[in-house]
Image: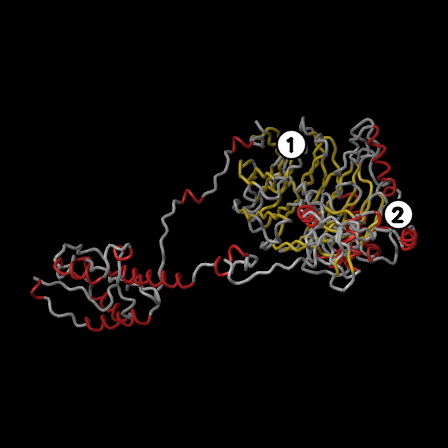
Amino acid sequence: MAKKRGMDGKKLATGADGENGKEDAAPADPAVTASWMHTDNLSSDEEDDDATNNRIGRVPLHWYDEHDHIGYDAHGNQVIKSASTQKDLLDQVLDAADEDKNKFTVYDSLNAKDVTLTPRQIELIRRLQGGAYAHPEHDANPDYIDYFSGVDPIKSGLNSDRYEKKTRFQPSKWEKLQVRRLLHRLKCGSINMDYLEGKVRDMNDLVKRDEGQDDKPFGLWKGDEEDELALRKGPQHMAAPKVPPPGHAFSYNPPEEYLPNEEELKEWEDLDPEDRPFGYFIPKKFDNLRSVGAYEHSVRERFERCLDLYLCPRAMKRRLNIDPESLVPQLPRASDLRPFPTTKCVQYVVPGQTEPVMVRCLTISPDGQFLASGGEDGVVRLWEVQTGRLVRSWDLMEFVGVGVVEEKKEEKEDESEQVESKKPIVSLEWNPNRSHHVLLAAIGKCAVVISTGTGGLDDSEVTEALLSAASSIKNGANISPDSRAAKAVTWTSLQRKSKPSTMTPVSAYGGKSGPIALIRTNPNPHRSDVSSVKWHRKGDYFVTVSPKAGAAAVLIHQLSKAASQQPFGKSKGGEAQLACFHPHKPFLFVATKEHIRVYHLVKQVMVKRLMTGCRHISSIDVHTSGDHVIVGSLDRRLVWFDLDLASTPYKTLKYHERALRSVGFHPRYPLMASASDDGSIHVFHSMVYSDLMRNPLIVPVKVLRGHQVVNKSLGALCMVFHPTQPWLFSAGADGNIHLFQDL
């Protein structure tokens, strides 16, 4: 091919063999040249047919240095970094030395991968470095075609390569102005549609034609003046309020009951005219209408009305005709949401008990076979669910009282102060691990670990291994003396102090039974009692809460090591009332009277603060998914939080008439319940969907009644769901424990 000079004056080959110095006299085919030139995409946008390249835009790439991916593609999938990006400097030097392998390889930093250049791309790069045109097929010096002005521009091709003007693709501003003027004239009435359609050449012709038709009939009460006022520019016109029509008292011959006597007239004289029944007017009786004189206060009343119309502001209120039933959400029927507890089937009664003892707390074993209750008398009772039989009873005051006496002896107090009244079991929790048959009870300033003795052969060995450290503790606890928890908690073994009658296991392979260890929190006698205990889902850690203990209000204990720790060094946000663990994440929920704080135990930071809007929180429970929390309060509120949504309540329910004492989710069924001091238990269908775009469905399905209100203040104090069945257990201040089943 013939060589031509480039822009730099050097001779460049126009063919594919130009770089080898070969010349070909045959001219290049224009079609082949065009096809070669269109094969190279030199634009800034890369072709990505599979949509697998990085699509993060102008995001700095160093943001992804700590991640295993570099961004996301068009489908939302992660663009994983290649193995070459993870090589160290030594590997990179060795790869650079290998010329045969990586001679024509470049690194794509946006997509984090190595790209091997094709021979075509290498040729284009070499031509650009040499100062020539990138495409070898490009003809930089075409033959000159002589054009002259006498030829038709269409035939000659002059100006054929020009782009169309931008104004040809935009609407005309002049036409827009003309249309706007015509619409304004049409709105004002100076023209009509006949003029626009061309039926009338001039509007004066219509005026002359309609001059003789002035006597047309028109609507007398049409009300066009209201429409004209509404179409006026400026503030909206608001008609003055109408004067109320006169009543019977304004008649010239009113009934006798409207005529005031002398005492009423004296009272009216002492009142202001605005406070009188009829203002300045006093009803009087005349024989006929001709005897009625002129009203003396007419000018004054008219002047005051003008002042009111002039000075008093008015506002336009639009009344919407909405059917109230359309505002009520369409909820499914309760019969379609079964199963849920409906009928009271079993009542648990203490044999030989003459006076009822208030039951404050309930808990059930993970297999649903046994139920434990904590009473006002400080006794923990173990029941069999199916038969209602009382299996075991443990009086914890016998163990707590010993510690109280020893503590007061050390303080050298009088013997009369060593006697302590009975304290109730305020909180009771069964270990959620099915292999750990252990109860945790809160009484006074202590938390007592109880072995139930209900396990089988394998479970009893696991339970004994769990309790081995707590049963053999001697020096208080396995706590470092320099830690904050060393002064806030003391562990005591109760293995030797238990009676033989309480040590008999329920199962033949139960092993140890009865109280095992006592955790005494807050040795200071002026501090408050333990109000709540909660297990971690794995069954080794548990948390205790003492509201008046300040910084040591929340303590976390590990049963397998008989150790404790104090997570907070200061008391922030008020007194802690309740605490519980997240079912899946290392989060700790700490509830004060009005707020709930969520702490990350690993990072030791506060993650979120939930604003409940309640005055005093009484109970809290976390959904098995971990994304939803319900809170009960003493001001009759049941608050539902969606942790992924916001820190404010998703729903606030107020169905009870008195304070709420207990709320909870069912571990398996979409059920939720709340127990209140009004003696009733409300059961809700609470469906939580896996689709994050759907909100939870909350439907009230049943109101369970069976507890009496004691002293006009206390009703149903506790409720708990069966772990595997749609059953509900409830306990109240009347001393009764009921089982509600789905019948």
Of 156 and 236, the residue lying toward us:
156
What residue is pinned by disc 1?
348
Quarter of the C terminus within the rendering:
top right
Q: At label 1, which amino acid type do we have?
A: Tyr
Disc 2 crowd rating (10 Å Cα; few below 14, some 14-19, many 20+) is few
Task: Return the x and y of residue 336 as percentages of the image width and height.
Answer: 53, 31
Residue 542 visible here: yes
Please tell me whether residue 357 is drawn above or below residue 103 in the rendered image: above
User: Would you say 712 lies left or right of 617 here?
Assistant: left
Q: Name the residue under label 2.
A: 101
Q: In this view, does 672 lie above or below 166?
A: above
Rounded to the nearest whole Å, what is the CA distance between mark 1 and mark 2? 83 Å
Front: mark 1 or 2: 2
Q: What number of labels is visible?
A: 2
Left or right of 544 in this view: 640: left
Residues 121 and 420: in front is 121
Q: What residue type is labelled 2?
A: Lys
Query: As rendered, which of 181 and 376 lies closer to the eye?
Result: 181
Q: How is the image coloured?
A: secondary structure
Disc nearer the start of the sequence (1/2): 2
